[in-house]
């Protein structure tokens, strides 16, 4: 029998299907075989993979997957043995390689590459973590033959890199995860002479590191995943002296302790995932581990699932082929897409093949959630519409299920109000920057997700009336979550007339108004990945026959939707674009 748990500290699974296994199916292969590549989920739900290596050497291009079809992505001009990437608040993707200090940005809207700034150091196999404020922490790695303890931050608003506090120990190939309290845990790794005996925690508020408790088993190429209850699971990896371990352990941030949990069935180093995560947190709260290789470099096709409520791993089917160091991506429909990778035994083989894992969920009719705007108002209630929100009985209570894509963090809310077709949450409070999957769960059955980000609206505007016009001013958008405004769209009420301003301008003049009629105004920030939430309403003003002349960039008679679709998008985004050692193959 299924059960859901309406709480934020999720000590139990969100739904349970005892003894049920997921289903593995082949999907459309990529055009190019690759391993050690980067892959990300984009704001539109598609998956992009970048670079990597294969039997021909470095792979120079990327591909983008949506609904069973792969399309090419232009080459970035940079290559490396291992590629890492993270999706920023703008929806653009920050991509870095181990062979260059130069980072690049992929713009999925324009299908183009932009400069991403120069790192303070060349780094091979550092960690790369999206922080709660939208900046990116890159820590450790090797450069110039030296293992690094240094770390740096990427700022999406300025597209620049700056040094931050250094770790106590140099390391690469370590595991890292953003904890629920906004700090970053890094565990073990490799020092050049052996596994690093220690873990550390980075505090973004101070830019400093503190020593965490020592992991029970030292390792690199391991997985580290955030569990629904706020603890972190460290599993597998290379443990030195030719040993690939099945050992798994749990870190408790509240107690600063590591505790052994159930061992995996298979030795796994370099399991399928991101280059330094290597496992996937499912919407149920379980962790999917698949692929990776043992000490003899035999790659496993078998999958297993970790249940943090029991501390046990259970088999969950197999991929069609054993592989390691490919990518794995949780999709909005709840499936996991696994791409590429390679096997070393019996001979080195790189794969273009792609597989899907469909987890088992409780039987019954799933709720359906309608499409929503990507950019939602931060801190406020989230309203979703759709069907089936009260279940087959018509009396069930739905839950809002939010899962952060970058670290798999899951939060669950009971409704402030709901009907079978409308769900309104309580105010969500402050959430870490990132892309979120929003689902409705009814009777333990999840809907497919809609993708959302949370941002602040433009500041409250003020208007000065003129002759059949009004000049509107507002505070600049703060760039919440690393998503600066490229421009603004103003709308008058009544009538829907409007004007636009390209950032950094924070004023424009609405013309075509009727003298003697009171008007109010709202502003929406225009971001690289969409239109932000509407601002508060201005105080009313009344145009009169005496006033200043017309201002710049007037757009008379536009509705709010038309304003958002003006040439601002192209012009502003073009302006924004102008601002501003792994396992060696071959």
Image: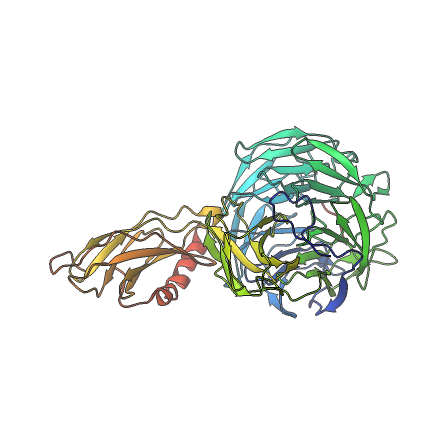
Residue lying at 63% horizontally and 29% vertically, measured from the top left: 210
Tell me where residue 270 appears, x and y as whole percent.
76, 49
> Position of 555 compared to 426: left or right?
left
Tell me where residue 578 appears, x and y as whole percent.
44, 54
Toward the left, the furthest residue is 546
Tell me where residue 567 appears, x and y as whole percent.
37, 65
Foreground pick, 34 / 231: 231
Residue 52 in view (yes/no): no
Quarter of the C terminus within the rendering: bottom right
Residue 45 in view (yes/no): yes
Residue 35 is drawn in which quadrant?
bottom right
Tell me where residue 233 appears, x and y as whole percent.
72, 42
Number of marks in the image?
0
Please say which color scheme the image uses.
rainbow
Foreground pick, 434 / 372: 372
Residue 549 is drawn in which quadrant?
bottom left
> Position of 296 compared to 364: left or right?
right
Residue lying at 53% horizontally and 31% vertically, measured from the top left: 206
Q: Does residue 251 sit above or below 300 in this rendering?
A: above
Q: Does residue 208 sit above or below 448 in this rendering?
A: above
Foreground pick, 571 / 548: 548
Quarter of the N terminus within the rendering: bottom right
């Amino acid at each position: 029998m299924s059960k859901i748990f309406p709480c934020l500290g999720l000590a139990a699974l969100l739904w349970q299907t005892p003894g049920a296994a997921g289903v593995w199916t082949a999907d459309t292969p990529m055009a190019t075989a690759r391993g050690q590549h980067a892959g990300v989920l984009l704001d539109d739900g598609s998956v992009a993979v970048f670079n990597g290596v294969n039997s021909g050497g470095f792979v120079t291009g990327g591909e983008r997957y949506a609904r069973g079809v792969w399309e090419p992505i232009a080459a970035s001009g940079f290559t490396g043995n291992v590629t890492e990437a993270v999706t920023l608040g703008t929806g653009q993707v920050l991509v870095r390689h181990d062979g260059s200090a130069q980072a690049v940005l992929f713009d999925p809207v324009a299908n183009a590459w932009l400069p991403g700034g120069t790192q303070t150091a060349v780094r091979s196999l550092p960690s790369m973590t999206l922080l709660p404020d939208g900046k990116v922490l890159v820590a450790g790695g090797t450069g110039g033959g030296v293992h690094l303890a240094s770390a740096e931050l990427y700022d999406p608003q300025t597209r620049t890199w700056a040094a931050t506090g250094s770790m106590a120990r140099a390391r690469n190939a370590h595991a890292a995860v953003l904890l629920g309290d906004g700090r970053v845990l890094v565990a073990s790794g490799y020092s050049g002479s052996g596994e690093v005996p220690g873990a550390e925690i980075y505090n973004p508020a101070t830019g400093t590191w503190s020593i965490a408790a020592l992991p029970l088993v030292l390792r690199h190429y391991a997985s580290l995943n955030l569990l629904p209850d706020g603890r972190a699971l460290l599993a597998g990896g290379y443990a030195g002296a030719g040993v690939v371990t099945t050992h798994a352990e749990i870190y408790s941030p509240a107690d600063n302790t590591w505790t052994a949990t159930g061992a995996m069935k298979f030795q796994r180093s370099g399991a399928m995932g991101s280059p330094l995560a290597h496992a996937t947190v499912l919407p149920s709260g379980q962790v999917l581990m698949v692929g990776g290789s043992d000490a003899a470099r035999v790659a496993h096709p078998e999958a297993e699932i970790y249940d943090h409520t029991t501390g046990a791993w259970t088999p969950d089917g197999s991929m069609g082929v054993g592989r390691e160091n490919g990518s794995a991506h949780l999709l909005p429909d709840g499936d996991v897409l696994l791409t590429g990778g390679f096997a070393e035994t019996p001979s080195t083989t790189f794969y273009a093949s792609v597989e899907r894992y469909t987890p088992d969920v409780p039987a019954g009719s799933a709720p359906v959630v309608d499409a929503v705007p990507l950019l939602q108002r931060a801190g406020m209630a989230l309203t979703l519409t759709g069907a089936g929100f009260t279940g087959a009985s018509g009396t069930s209570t739905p839950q809002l299920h939010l899962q952060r894509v970058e670290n798999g963090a899951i939060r669950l809310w009971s409704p402030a109000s709901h009907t079978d077709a409308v769900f309104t949450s309580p105010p969500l409070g402050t959430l870490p920057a990132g892309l979120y999957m929003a689902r409705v769960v009814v009777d333990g059955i999840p809907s497919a997700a809609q993708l959302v980000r949370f941002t602040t609206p433009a500041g409250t505007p003020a208007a000065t009336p003129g002759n059949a016009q009004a000049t509107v001013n507002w505070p600049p958008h703060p760039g919440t979550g690393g998503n600066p405004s490229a421009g603004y769209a103003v709308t008058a009420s009544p009538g829907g007339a409007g004007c636009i301003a390209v950032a950094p301008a924070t004023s424009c003049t609405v013309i075509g108004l009727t003298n003697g009629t009171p008007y109010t105004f709202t502003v929406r920030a225009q971001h690289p990945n969409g239109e932000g939430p509407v601002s508060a309403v201005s105080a009313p003003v009344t145009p009169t026959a005496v006033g200043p002349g017309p201002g710049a960039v007037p757009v008379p008679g536009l509705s709010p939707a038309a304003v958002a679709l003006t040439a601002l998008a192209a012009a502003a985004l073009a302006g924004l674009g102008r601002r501003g050692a792994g396992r060696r193959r071959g």
